[in-house]
Amino acid sequence: MPNTLDLTQIPELFAQTSQNPVVVSLVATIFGVYIIVLVWARVKDRSDLRKAKVTVLFDNDPHAQYRYLIRIQTGHRKGAATTAKVVIMLIGSKGQSDPHFLTDSEKPVFERGAADEFLLTTFFSLGTLQSIRLWHDNSGSSPSWYVNHVTVLDVEANKQWRFICNSWLAIDIDENMIDKIFLAASDMELKSFK
């Protein structure tokens, strides 16, 4: 049978901690490590909250009222982040957008494993999006970029398109290209498992 626990003896048990200092120091160390990890996790959560925002592109025309929300997922591969200036162009059935720089002066963009959101405006609806064109200027200390996928939401019509990229935009990796066109994913591509 297990020993019964008498709660009235708790003060006496704490008075006997000097008899076994190893246990007391072990419990204190574990509690101290727990507090340190808790503070570290809270700091990281706050830094993630600062990064989670929609960036309104600086080169949007103030008179353009048709909005597209673009979400770009950078891959988790080693060296996937980029220091280059990335440009996007949306191509639809009714026309194409102007090229837009995807930058944010308040936070770093296109870090490894990160998802960045941008608001792009046009003067008119581009219709059904057929493709996007992504490229960069190959600048900075680490210009190679692995783009995983891109999601474009037509805010006005509430339609969404996904572009499965899984591709390097780099002059020294894979296809050695920094300018690529990606077609909108079909239902079969979205449902297939790789």
Image (cartoon, grey):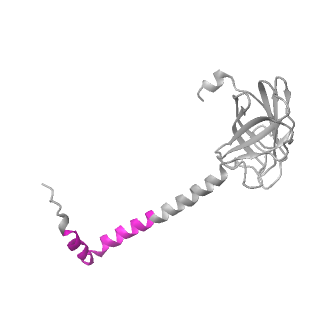
| Residue at x 57%, y 55% (from the top left corner) | 45
| Residue at x 15%, y 56% (from the top left corner) | 2
- Decide if residue 147 is on the left or right side of residue 192: right
Q: Looking at the image, which residue sits at the far left?
A: 1
Q: Nearer the viewer, residue 18 or 118?
A: 118
Residue 185 seen by the camera: yes
Q: Nearer the viewer, residue 37 or 43?
A: 43
The kind of secondary structure the magenta stretch mainly shows is: helix
Quarter of the figure that contains the C terminus: top right
- Decide if residue 123 is on the left or right side of residue 1: right
Q: Quadrant of residue 118?
A: top right
Q: Quadrant of residue 117?
A: top right
- Decide if residue 37 is on the left or right side of residue 77: left
Q: Nearer the viewer, residue 48 or 144?
A: 48
On screen, residue 144 above or below 33 = above
| Residue at x 79%, y 32% (from the top left corner) | 132
In percent of width and height, residue 170 lies at: 78, 43
Residue 177 seen by the camera: no
Q: Quadrant of residue 183?
A: top right
Q: Would residue 56 be counted in the magenta stretch?
A: no
In percent of width and height, residue 99 lies at: 86, 39
Q: Looking at the image, which residue sits at the far bottom?
A: 18
In percent of width and height, residue 190 lies at: 63, 26
Residue numbers of the magenta segment = 9-34
Quarter of the figure that contains the N terminus: bottom left
In percent of width and height, residue 79 lies at: 69, 49
Q: Would residue 17 be counted in the magenta stretch?
A: yes
On screen, residue 157 above or below 48 = above
| Residue at x 72%, y 53% (from the top left corner) | 108
